[in-house]
Amino acid sequence: MLYSPIAPMHIPDGFLSIVISVICWAITIVTLGVAISRTNKSLGERQVPLMGVMAAFIFAAQMINFPVAGGTSGHLLGGALAAITLGPWAGMLVMTAVIAVQGLLFQDGGLVVMGANILNMGLLTAAVGYGLYRSAIGSKFTIKLTVAGVAAWLSVMTGALATSMQLWLSGTANIGVVVPAMLGVHALIGLGEALVTVAALSFILRTRPDLLGEQSASAQGGRGWILTGVLITLAVVLLSPLASASPDGLNRVAMDLGFIQTAQTASGPLAGYTVPFLSSISASKIVAGSIGVIVVLAIAVITGRSLQTKKPNS
Amino acid sequence: MHSDAFDRYHHHDSALHRLDPRIKVVVAIAFIISNALLPDGAWMAFGLAWLFVLLASALSDLGLGYTFRRSFIVLPFALVAVTVLFSIPGKPVSQFHFMMWDFTVTDAGLLRFVSIVIRSWISVQIAILLVAVTRFPDLIHAFEHLRVPAILTTIIAFLYRYLFVLSDEVIRLLRARQSRSAAAAGQRSGGGVLWRARVSGNMAGQLFLRSYERSDRIYNAMLARGYAGQLLTLNPHELHGRDWAYAVAAFLFILAMQFVGRF
């Protein structure tokens, strides 16, 4: 009743190959190791109650839903919001706890593939969400919120793309279908995420501006985060159209690297992607195109911002 | 709120309930890894894996159908694997026409799809059983013994502890929203989607502030009671001979499953 898995992003066990699961765990463990040592330094023992309760907050906030249309409803995923309000490292730990409990207690996401789920929904969302937001930290109310909205939307798209890539590399889904389908669905989910994140942030900025001010945990992340955010964004921008438009090339690469062992007899009439409704026609191009436009806008804003905020320092 | 709304633990006094949580966690994870390692179409091994789930269910006193009834949670995700039905080259099994496209299901694709779904379905059942026979705090404690960083396990323990408190908070917020935005008969209540999203966002922001301030109070209270950075537990978690016996039996079963699946 209270807990219903919604976004099709929690991968269950059995859908990823062992190789991919292990690679994702490795990335996740290294990142979490850094996150733990960083938060230890900045928060000390106070971090336990703070992050524990904030993790419960993300969990509870996901229950606040709003009807969209036709019986579907939107709600918060929280990766970007957690990273923006608590700082990137703390945000990652909080999201890790949330995903761990979703997997352990509700079987929403598997145990062996949890490394991948944490990477997709906790680490990448926090990195992109915070990285883009970090560039707008010194700017005006509206610009800050706009950038936060774009960051929240992109964080969902990044998670969706990473999920589809892992499924494809495990040989569980066809890249020409899964990427446009996942990105298409999450473009809408991300819109809800962006709206709720912006509204929540504007509420916090109006009532407790100190929590997001110069001295807060939110402003402590270094400039390297901007670079991280932009790099991940660029990867999403470059990979999405590539995966939608020319899955053959990526399939080739994945097979050469030994990820996919399907005996591909390319001459057969059924080789590659034979479900045409998303791979060939305009849907994927529209998705790819709109990502492109928004990302170019975001990068323009970011570069402008970071150039502007540098001046007082020098 | 009553804790049963979230807790999946079922109180019994079975052999599986009494088993050390560390053994349960390690065996469950080994079993899931073993499932992932089984090759496509290893029907005998899949059958053995299911037998493993049934045996574990029998040891748990929860009834053989318990995990089965709850295992449908993975089904929606099977949608993403549907594409392999058509995309792996092989002999055509069935063809059908949908809207304006022809779909051809190949034998290789069917084999892969069915294998993925079975693997996932069996794996989720053992995970369901794990939380049904282990108290969540014990589960967390087991992870701590298994060298998961204490900071992570403590955050998770806190998340679990305050989940109920904050859920109550959310239920109050939702009830307030419902009662304030009641519609007069024949009239539409509230604004459009954007307005609704903003209201939800404001509620999330409010919940954020309440949680943040609560965490301050909690920390102060903990300090007042002598908190020095560690949560203490009375449960010693000692491994007995019986626990080892179960562990060895489970691993032999898993090895046999791999053997059957591969040769």
Image (cartoon, helix red, strand yellow):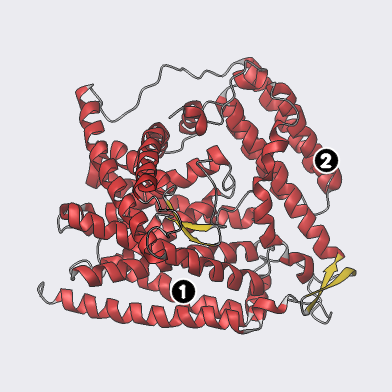
Label 2 resides on the chain identified as B
Q: Residue at x 46, y 17 (%)?
A: B236
Above or below: residue A61 compared with residue A267: above
Q: Which residue is mark 1?
A: A235
Residue at the outermost front position: B185
Kindly identify the amino acid type of the residue bearing the numbered disc 2.
Gly
Q: Examine the rendering and report whether any part of residue A220 can be seen.
A: no
Count of picture labels: 2
Quadrant the C terminus of chain A occupies: bottom left
From mark 1 to mark 2, how far is it between C-alphas?
42 Å
Say which of A69 and A80 sits in front.
A69
Q: Residue at x 18, y 53 (%)?
A: A207
**Rendering coords of residue A184 (x, y %):** 55, 71
The secondary element bearing badge 1 is classed as helix
Q: Examine the rendering and report whether any part of residue A310 can be seen.
A: yes
The secondary element bearing badge 2 is classed as helix
Label 1 resides on the chain identified as A
**Rendering coords of residue A132 (x, y %):** 32, 69
Q: Residue at x 49, y 57 (%)?
A: A73
User: How would you rate the neighbour count of disc 2 (Cα within 10 Å): few for under 14, some for 14-19, many for 20 or more?
Assistant: some
Kindly identify the amino acid type of the residue bearing the numbered disc 1.
Ala
Above or below: residue B203 compared with residue B155: below
**Rendering coords of residue B141 (x, y %):** 47, 28
Left or right: where does residue B106 sit relative to residue B228?
right
**Circle number at residue B101:** none
Say which of A121 and A39 sits in front.
A121
Q: Residue at x 11, y 72 (%)?
A: A313
Quadrant housing residue A49: top left
Q: Which residue is mark 2?
A: B47
Say which of B204 and A183 sits in front.
B204
User: How would you rate the neighbour count of disc 1 (Cα within 10 Å): few for under 14, some for 14-19, many for 20 or more?
Assistant: few
